[in-house]
Image (cartoon, rainbow, N blue to C red):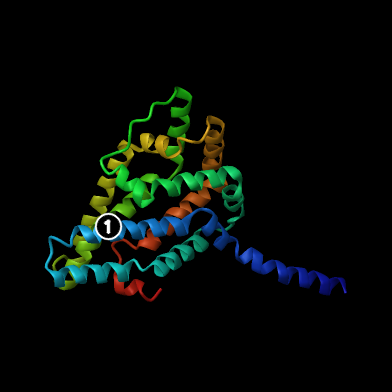
Amino acid sequence: MRLLFAVTLLLFGLPALADDHANLYQAAGWPEQRAHFNDALTAAQQRYQKTLPPAVYQALVDNSNRRFQPQAIDQRAQVALRNQLQDPRPALAFFQSPLGKKIIAAETLATRRDQLAKHASGLPRIEAEATRRLLIGHLAQALPAREAGAEVSLALAGVAADSLSQMLPGLLGGGQAQGMIDGQRQRLMEQIGNDLDNTLLYVYRDLSDPELEEFVTFAESAEGKAYYQAALAAVRAGLAVGQDASAQQGL
């Protein structure tokens, strides 16, 4: 009887365990950020509407919508998160805490369409005391903000390039195209890094110094490093920059 009871508990516990990654994906704001990316994608498409012939423009829209289909982005990102993060429970507990929810709210607000439009010409300069600047400096080192920001920028910038390469096959050899992407990725990371401290000061402006210190403690912990390393892998998998779009459709 005790064995049957133990097996029953195990069976009830397995779905909850298996779902921790999905719960983390929700708690850490991934669906909202993906929706914000798709908003930015629509804006990027619209910028080409007045400068391209109708047929070329429609091809651009169709190609980019196919590559960045929301469910496909979510699926690729979630698979990568599961594969890269062995134990999601510490990160899940952090992002489900009051502080974690406050952090995610600040991050998703910052990438909302109206906020991006409001600060299209740049963020305001944020003044901060030395202690807060030190904490932000630690956070800038712990978070993969440069790398993730570069992937998002490359994905949006590549909308036209993807369509052009499909309409004119062989225009750029695979090695040449990848070399251009890698070079642009590095330049974007450097540009983002130049103003990263001010960006983080702005995004997390409503966090108190003790809250910011707690955030830094998590980000620098073994559990935090494991999560953010997996998160970067998930961003790269979800956006699939530089990868063949047709191959990604089958995932």
The quadrant the C terminus occupies is: bottom left
- Residue at 77% x, 72% y is 8
Whether residue 184 sits left or right of residue 225 in the image: it is: left
Label 1 belongs to which residue? 43
Residue 242 coordinates in the image, percent (x, y):
28, 62
Residue 74 coordinates in the image, percent (x, y):
44, 65
Furthest residue to the right?
1
Can residue 216 be seen here?
Answer: yes
Furthest residue to the bottom?
250
The quadrant the N terminus occupies is: bottom right
Quarter-wise, where is residue 146 in the image? top left
182 or 114, nearer to the observer? 114
- Residue at 39% x, 66% y is 70
Q: Indicate the amino acid at tag 1.
A: Ala
Residue 172 coordinates in the image, percent (x, y):
16, 65
- Residue at 40% x, 45% y is 110
- Residue at 65% x, 69% y is 15
Picture layout, residue 41 above or below residue 185: below
Dot 1: element: helix
The 10 Å Cα crowd at callout 1, few under 14, some 14 to 19, many 20 or more, is few
Residue 232 coordinates in the image, percent (x, y):
42, 53
Whether residue 124 sits left or right of residue 137 in the image: it is: left
Can residue 178 be seen here?
Answer: no
215 or 111, nearer to the observer? 111
Quarter-wise, where is residue 140 in the image? top left
